[in-house]
Image (tube, rainbow, N blue to C red):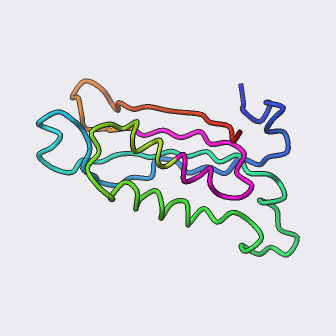
Amino acid sequence: MSELLDPRLRDCRKLFMRELRTEISIGFHAFEREARQPVLINIDLYVLLAHSTSGRDDVRDVLDYDEIRTKSIALAHSRHFNLQETLLDLIVAMALSYPGVRAVRASIEKPNVYPDCRTVGIEVFRVHP
């Protein structure tokens, strides 16, 4: 079911970023602490139409996802994370702090952890109170 069917999000547009790839220090296993590893970050932003529509075709009228991308990468590189949950919570809190962002669905995946899994990861969906 699409989140846009949720009555709280009917006045929103969904902006998304798929598989933002960066190499970071993450994990609590000894083998994960030896070197940076790739992660894939996915973010869906449910933004009020008033904050995601421009009658002038001008980026200054809408939420600029370049900024979300840049800040997500900066958070991911800010320190070592034992848990994906910790980094994901920081990314979601940052995204929810933008005016007009009503909800965020985000996930982090680690593609190189286990040889028998394509990725392992977590996902969260939060609606602004």
Q: Depth check: give the residue in front, 116 or 49.
A: 49
Q: Looking at the rendering, which quadrant does residue 129 occupy? A: top right
Quarter of the figure with the N terminus: top right
- Residue furthest front as drawn: 129
Q: Residue at x 40, y 62 (%)?
A: 74
Query: On the rendered structure, is 38 left or right of 49?
Result: left
Residue 7: % across, % down: 84, 32
Query: Front-most of 88 and 69?
Result: 88
On screen, residue 123 versus residue 28, left or right, reads right
For the point 56% across and 66% down, the residue is 66
Q: Which residues are magenta?
A: 92-108
Q: Quadrant of residue 49?
A: bottom right
Magenta stretch encompasses residue 97? yes
User: Number of callouts in the render?
Assistant: 0
Q: Position of residue 61 (x, y in %)?
A: 77, 70
Q: Residue furthest right?
A: 55
The x and y percentages for residue 31 are: 12, 37
Residue 89 position, x and y percent, is 47, 42
Q: Residue at x 48, y 38 (%)?
A: 107
Note whether 85 is above or below 71 in the view shown. above
Give the answer, above or below, for where 11 lies relative to 122: below
Q: Is residue 113 left or right of residue 64?
A: left
Does the segment drawn in magenta span residue 101?
Answer: yes
Q: Choose top left, top right, bottom left or bottom right for residue 40.
A: top left
